Amino acid sequence: MEATRKDKGMQVQVEVKEREKEILAVAAQLFAQEGFETVAVRNIAEAVGLSKATLYHYFKDKDEIYARIVIDTMEKICLYVEGRVAGAGSNRERLVIFMEANATFFEENIWTATALLLGLGGLNQPHQREKVAYWRDRHEQNLRKIIRDGIAAGEFRPVNPAVAGRAILSTLNWMGRWYKPDGPTRAHEFALEYADLFLGGLVA
Amino acid sequence: MEATRKDKGMQVQVEVKEREKEILAVAAQLFAQEGFETVAVRNIAEAVGLSKATLYHYFKDKDEIYARIVIDTMEKICLYVEGRVAGAGSNRERLVIFMEANATFFEENIWTATALLLGLGGLNQPHQREKVAYWRDRHEQNLRKIIRDGIAAGEFRPVNPAVAGRAILSTLNWMGRWYKPDGPTRAHEFALEYADLFLGGLVA
DNA sequence: TTTTACCTCGACTTGCTGTTAAATTTTGAA
DNA sequence: TTCAAAATTTAACAGCAAGTCGAGGTAAAA
């Protein structure tokens, strides 16, 4: 039940403690479903099956729980998409994979991703904001690079990469507001349809 | 200062009272900036320059203030865009105007529109949810019809109107999360760039 | 003038919030 | 078995939130 590695005395926190993960997962679901302010610390504690005070053994305060969810998730989604895009050939292919992987991560991490996308509350401490800004920017820059490279290679029209990138991410991020996992269509399928639309455009 | 018409004893509430409008405007700004749960009724009262109890003379409770903002704004944006689209010729032109008008309304009603788009809290009473759902659906159906007509007329490729409509609205709605009025570019200019992207696509 | 309807307020209640301190149990290694 | 560290709990606290109450004021109608 305990995953902490203490092999050499260093890297004590390589593996996040199970309880911590459990608390974060439960809290993320509640935040995603009810909203940060609406969820009381007591609600999280009850959902995990612990007393309220125990949560304060693992986390400094309620804000830290939320911050951990947001920062961890933003980092993971960026790295996940980077990994999936890495093996692709053309920039067109890269773009499709970027979008599909984004949606796949979203549906496989529906609660943490939703908590992130709803942007409930806000990170209070500057170093928290910096971390999430770093990964968010990196993610967006990765997308812009695909577009820029595609333009340079003659695959894409000379659109504004910043605008196109923002449009694409908008469609993916807005999924956090309407996508329901019990519907007939998976999130990554929507992403593929969006990709087709962005690539081919509307004009006949 | 008082706009209430009592001409015949009926239609007392044809013109919304000034104070009510003032409270709604101030509350919308606070909700948009801080979030529904974060803003206390006392904060709204202080910002308007009234006592807390006075707000309860105009509104049943805090939720009703928020509901009024959301419902009124959703109705107005739908009707505004309908009016702007009405005079257009081709479906391509209609689509561009739909997107631009949407963004224009957003930037001209930045606080109420942002409060709506952030979707903070949720409408509790069913009849409130129904009202906003009605206008939201009507708005989206208007967009889908443009796409469907465009396909039928041979102007557009045979894409899925529901998916394309959702993609387009996603880009416009997500503006509520990043657009800052003090930037160098107006919201409706972004909308035009998005429209160009959706129409022409990325592929060269 | 009297009445009526509206507008405004300060003081209050009630309930829940995040957070903490102290005490207790569990765990795991020596 | 011993014993310190980690995990957990119980029981409280202080603060602030939404919402209420009763009353005072005002302007115009009757």
Image (cartoon, coloured by chain):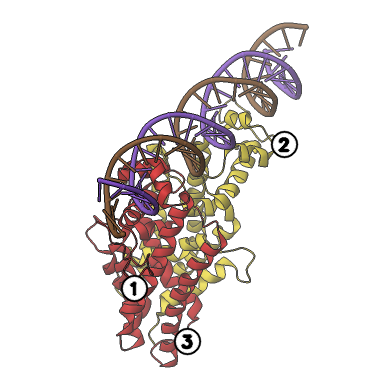
Chain colours: A red, B yellow, C brown, D purple
Residue A180, located in which quarter of the rendered image? bottom left
Q: Viewer-nearest of labels 2 and 3?
A: 3
Quadrant showing the N terminus of chain B: top right
Q: Which residue is mark 1?
A: A80
**Residue A160: which disc?**
none
Q: Viewer-nearest of labels 1 and 2?
A: 1
Establish if C22 lies above or below B116.
Answer: above
Mark 1 or mark 3: whose residue is earlier in sequence: 1
* Amino acid type at image mark 3: Pro
Q: Secondary structure at mark 3?
A: loop
Q: What residue appears at the point 44 percent right and 77 percent down from the top-left corner?
A: B197
Of all residues, the one furthest to the bottom in this rendering is: A153
Establish if A119 lies above or below A144.
Answer: above
Q: Which residue is mark 2?
A: B1
Q: Which residue is mark 3?
A: A158
Quadrant showing the C terminus of chain B: bottom left
